[in-house]
């Protein structure tokens, strides 16, 4: 197992395209955000922070996760700006498989959060359409409550309140989790989203990726 000097080699060009789509959507939601690239063995876990949460425990934090296969075992754990990574993936050719690692590193607050690897208990399944609607309703509420001239503290408080509210579903999940699935393109009409819980964490799983919140 090695630590790559310049980049990670993915299993195939489609994996690189999928990853480029994922980080591009994350940058659209959080333009000044970061991405954590965590390679262990032949798997690359790509984390993005969509909502920071509040308080010492970062209550309400929402993370997105996409995993892809690597062509060779590697070891890496680094956080880089989303803008820097998307600049590099945008230059990839149709047959490229190498993911260049930007030299800039950052230390976002959410990167210190470590969801558990085990102990997850299934708590239910939710329809993708319900989560789509919860996300769209939250986005509309925030837009309506954030007119021109609204102070940044007031807007931040509104966002925190809207995304912390539970969805009208069984099981209920924070609306911020629905927001994460929506903006990352993880929701497929007609498919169910499985919900697992472990301690303070909730994980929503689709065929495309994961969203975790606490």
Image: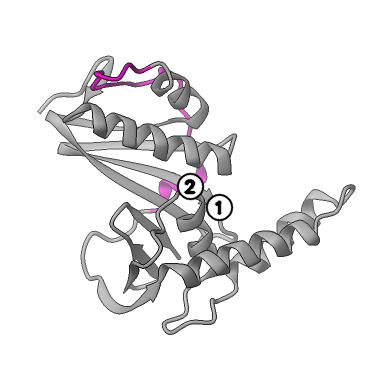
- Dot 1, how many residues are within 10 Å of its Cα: few (below 14), some (14-19), or many (20+)? some
Look at the numbered disc 2 and give the secondary structure of its residue. strand
Q: Which mark is residue 52?
A: 1
Judge whether residue 122 can be spotted in this image: yes
- Residue at x 41%, y 36% (from the top left corner): 21
Residue drawn at (43%, 25%), measured in percent from left and top? 85
Name the residue beneath numbered marker 2. Answer: 49
Question: For this rendering, which residue is in front, 107 or 64?
Answer: 64
**What is the chief secondary structure element of the magenta stretch?**
loop
Is residue 111 shown in magenta? yes
Residue 102, given in percent of the width and then of the height, sits at: 40, 20
Residue 81 on the magenta span: no
Which residue corresponds to the image point at 75% horizontal and 56% vertical from the top-left? Answer: 143
Residue 23 in the image, given as x and y percentages of width and height: 43, 36
Q: Which quadrant of the figure has residue 159?
A: bottom right
Residue at 72 percent of width and 65 percent of height: 141
Image-based side of 94 in relation to 188, left or right: left
Query: Disc 1 vs disc 2: Cβ atoms closer than 8 Å?
Result: yes
Quadrant including the N terminus? top left
The reply to whether residue 59 is visible in this rendering is no
The picture places residue 193, in percent across and down from the top left corner, at 35, 68
Q: Tell whether 30 sits left or right of 214.
A: right
- The quadrant of the rendering that contains the C terminus is bottom left
Work out whether 200 lies above or below 1.
below
Q: In which quarter of the image is residue 76?
A: top left
- 1 up-or-down from 154: above or below: above
Q: Give the range drawn in magenta.
A: 92-113
């Amino acid at each position: 197992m090695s630590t790559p000097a310049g980049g990670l080699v993915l299993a195939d060009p489609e994996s690189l395209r999928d990853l480029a789509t994922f980080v591009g959507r994350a940058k659209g939601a959080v333009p000044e955000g970061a991405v954590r690239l965590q390679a262990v063995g032949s798997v690359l876990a790509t984390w993005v922070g969509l909502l920071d949460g509040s308080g010492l425990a970062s209550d309400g934090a929402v993370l997105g996760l996409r995993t892809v296969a690597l062509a060779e075992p590697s070891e890496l754990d680094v956080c880089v700006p989303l803008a820097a990574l998307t600049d590099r993936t945008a230059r990839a050719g149709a047959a490229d498989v190498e993911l260049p690692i930007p030299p800039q590193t950052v230390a976002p607050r959410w990167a210190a959060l470590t969801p558990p690897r085990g102990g997850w208990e299934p708590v239910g399944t939710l329809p993708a359409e319900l989560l789509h609607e919860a996300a769209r309703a939250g986005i509309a509420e925030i837009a309506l409550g954030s007119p021109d001239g609204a102070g940044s503290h007031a807007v931040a408080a509104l966002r925190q309140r809207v995304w912390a509210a539970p969805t009208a579903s069984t099981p209920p999940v924070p609306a911020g989790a629905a927001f994460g699935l929506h903006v990352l393109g993880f929701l497929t009409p007609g498919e169910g989203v499985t919900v697992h819980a472990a301690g303070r964490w909730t994980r929503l799983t689709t065929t495309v990726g994961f969203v975790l919140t606490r």
